[in-house]
Image (cartoon, rainbow, N blue to C red):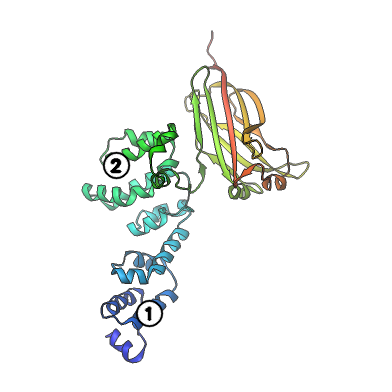
């Protein structure tokens, strides 16, 4: 009736998104092109809401209609990704989000989340709640959810945990295959040389999200002494957001049985009132009690002019209290640091922390 009315009057009597989509489908079937264009225009002018966004993404359109409203589905994805980008504010609400919404939100790079480990844990919990039937859950996990997880940015410990887990919540065979590939790449990057460019981009060059904990690359040695070499890359945009009092924390790394992390920050000096870039190392207090470490550490940054890492700060520390580093790593004001093209190589600041353990002593033990 609506199509007949439109053919005589050129108008429609509804502005409901679901009804307009039904009319659009019918107009496509009967090849009433003017009605299709009118429906499309009305839909485009409607304000985007959570309900309409999910409707556009999950509506069973024909191929021609799907192409006609592609701009609506693209706008719906952008709307949901923007609305729910601060994960911590919506974690409970997202647990009831339908699959098309989950795909739109977790496909985005702007998602602000603690780490990629959190993405994996949430999607697993969501899948178990939404799909209690094992076979259906395995199918959805493998075909729709696994592609959302950026395994290359997960921590070593989480990858190991998932790899050794034997529960039946997900299709573990496909999950473990992806994780093994990631671990091989992390340990032996050269192994990917035999893959195609497309495979490489898919597996390893997926961008990081807006993580609260920044991923790092770590090389560890046990001999001749415990040593950890940590590489941290910060984009120019990430550094800019540190001003005036921000900080970025990294994933944990391990040294001599202890957990450490790096902190990059911007700090104002009380006397000069000038701001500068700082980098320090902090140790996590272990539940079993403090362990006294003597550690030689060095902080360095790569420069464009030399192409190598140049030492910016080095020191030795013995004790239980750890938050050591340099509040003015480059010994220049913030404005000079943030515009230094010799440090920001193609828009990225490359930092390195090298920690070596000298003597490991347990307090209270007598020789």
- What numbered label is drawn on residue 174? 2
Residue lying at 66% horizontally and 27% vertically, measured from the top left: 314
Q: Relative to 305, is 31 on the left or the right?
A: left
- What numbered label is drawn on residue 37? 1
Count neighbours of disc 1 (C-alpha within 10 A) and say few if under 14, some if 14 to 19, many if 20 or more. some
Viewer-side residue, 98 vs 341 = 341
Count neighbours of disc 2 (C-alpha within 10 A) and say few if under 14, some if 14 to 19, many if 20 or more. few
Quick one: SS at disc 1? Answer: helix
Residue lying at 62% horizontally and 33% vertically, measured from the top left: 309
Q: Relative to 322, is 84 on the left or the right?
A: left
- Residue 192 visible in the current orientation: no
Is the C terminus in the top left, top right, bottom left or bottom right quadrant?
top right
Up/down of 302 relative to 148, above or below? above
Up/down of 356 relative to 364, above or below? below
Q: Quadrant of residue 310?
A: top right
Percent across and percent down for residue 94 are: 39, 55
């Amino acid at each position: 009736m609506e199509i007949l009315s439109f053919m005589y009057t050129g108008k429609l009597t509804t502005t409901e998104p679901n009804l307009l989509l039904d009319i659009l489908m019918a107009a496509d079937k009967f090849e009433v092109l003017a009605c299709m264009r009118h429906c499309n225009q009305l839909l485009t002018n409607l304000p985007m809401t959570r309900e309409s966004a999910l409707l556009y993404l999950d509506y069973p359109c024909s191929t021609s209609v799907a192409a006609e409203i592609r701009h609506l589905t693209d706008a719906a994805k952008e709307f949901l990704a923007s609305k729910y980008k601060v994960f911590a504010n919506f974690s409970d609400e997202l647990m009831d989000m339908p699959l098309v919404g989950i795909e739109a939100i977790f496909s985005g790079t702007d998602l602000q989340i603690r780490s990629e480990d959190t993405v994996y844990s949430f999607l697993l919990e969501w899948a178990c709640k939404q799909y209690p039937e094992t076979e259906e859950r395995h199918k959805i996990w493998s075909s729709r959810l696994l592609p959302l997880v950026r395994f290359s940015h997960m921590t070593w410990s989480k990858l190991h945990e998932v790899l050794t887990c034997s529960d039946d919540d997900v299709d573990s065979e496909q999950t473990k295959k992806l994780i093994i590939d990631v671990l091989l790449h992390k340990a032996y990057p050269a192994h990917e040389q035999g893959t195609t460019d497309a495979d490489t981009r898919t597996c390893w060059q997926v961008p990081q999200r807006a993580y609260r904990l920044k991923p790092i690359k770590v090389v560890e040695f046990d001999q001749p002494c415990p040593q950890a070499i940590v590489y941290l890359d910060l984009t120019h945009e990430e550094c800019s957001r540190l001003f005036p009092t921000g900080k970025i924390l990294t994933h944990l790394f391990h040294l001599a049985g202890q957990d450490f992390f790096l902190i990059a920050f911007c700090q104002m000096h009380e006397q000069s009132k000038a701001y500068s870039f700082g980098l320090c190392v902090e140790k996590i207090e272990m539940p079993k009690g403090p362990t006294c470490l003597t550690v030689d550490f060095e902080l360095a940054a790569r420069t464009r002019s030399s192409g190598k890492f140049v030492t910016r700060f080095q020191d030795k520390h013995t004790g239980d209290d750890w938050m050591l580093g340099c509040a003015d790593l480059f010994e220049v004001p913030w404005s000079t640091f943030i515009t230094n093209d010799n440090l920001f190589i193609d828009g990225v600041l490359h930092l390195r922390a090298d920690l070596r353990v000298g003597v490991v002593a347990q307090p209270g033990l007598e020789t």
